[in-house]
Amino acid sequence: MDELEAPPDADAARRRGTVVHCGWCGRRLEQGSTGRRRRYCGQSCRQRAYERRVAVQRSGLPEDAVVLSDTELTALQDRLFQLRCAAEDVVTAADDGAGPGELRRMALELAETARDLERLR
């Protein structure tokens, strides 16, 4: 093996160090050190993902299509609006000369809002 090449197991270990989220609900998954990587947090999420794949195949939509109900779309738009408002609040506070403590608190709130938005379901 060439000196510059990493052993195959090092590459797998590097991949396991990345943060992985459930393919259905978006919760963070803890990965074990051996075996296949988990894709879902539990059986119910695995089942829902399967049902969605089957429904997509039957409908003729592309495999990577994202289908949202009106309720889900409205909720997503509301959450995006909250994120934008939180970001604008940070900019306004910085322009008004807010102190570092207040800006940090607002930035933490902004990060939490963005983290919640990552979970689409």
Image (spheres, grey):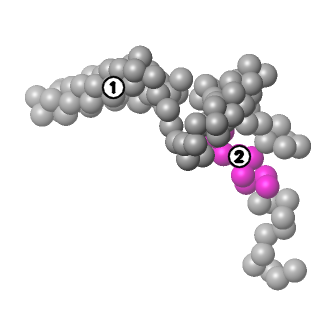
Dividing the picture into quadrants, the one containing residue 108 is top left
Q: Nearer the viewer, residue 100 or 89?
A: 89
- Residue lying farthest bottom? 2
Give the residue displayed 41% in from the left and 30% down from the top: 114
| Secondary structure of residue under mark 2 | loop
| Residue 1 coordinates in the image, percent (x, y) | 87, 80
Give the residue displayed 65% in from the left and 40% down from the top: 57
Q: Which mark is residue 12?
A: none
Q: Which mark is residue 77?
A: 1
Circle 2 is placed at which residue position? 17
Q: Amino acid at mark 2?
A: Gly
Q: Nearer the viewer, residue 115 or 42?
A: 42
| Vertical arrangement, residue 22 with respect to residue 4, above or below | above
Mark 2 and mark 1 lie on one chain; the one further toward the N terminus is 2
- Residue lying farthest left? 96
Q: Does the magenta portion include 53?
A: no
Q: CA distance from mark 2 to mark 1?
A: 32 Å
| Vertical arrangement, residue 76 with respect to residue 4, above or below | above
Q: Amino acid at mark 1?
A: Gln
| Secondary structure of residue under mark 1 | helix
Give the residue displayed 69% in from the left and 34% down from the top: 54
The answer to whether residue 113 is seen in the rendering is no
| Vertical arrangement, residue 65 with respect to residue 116, above or below | below
| Residue 46 coordinates in the image, percent (x, y) | 74, 28
Q: Is residue 104 left or right of residue 44?
A: left
In front of the other: label 2 or label 1? 1
Q: Nearer the viewer, residue 70 or 4?
A: 70
* Magenta highlight range: 12-20
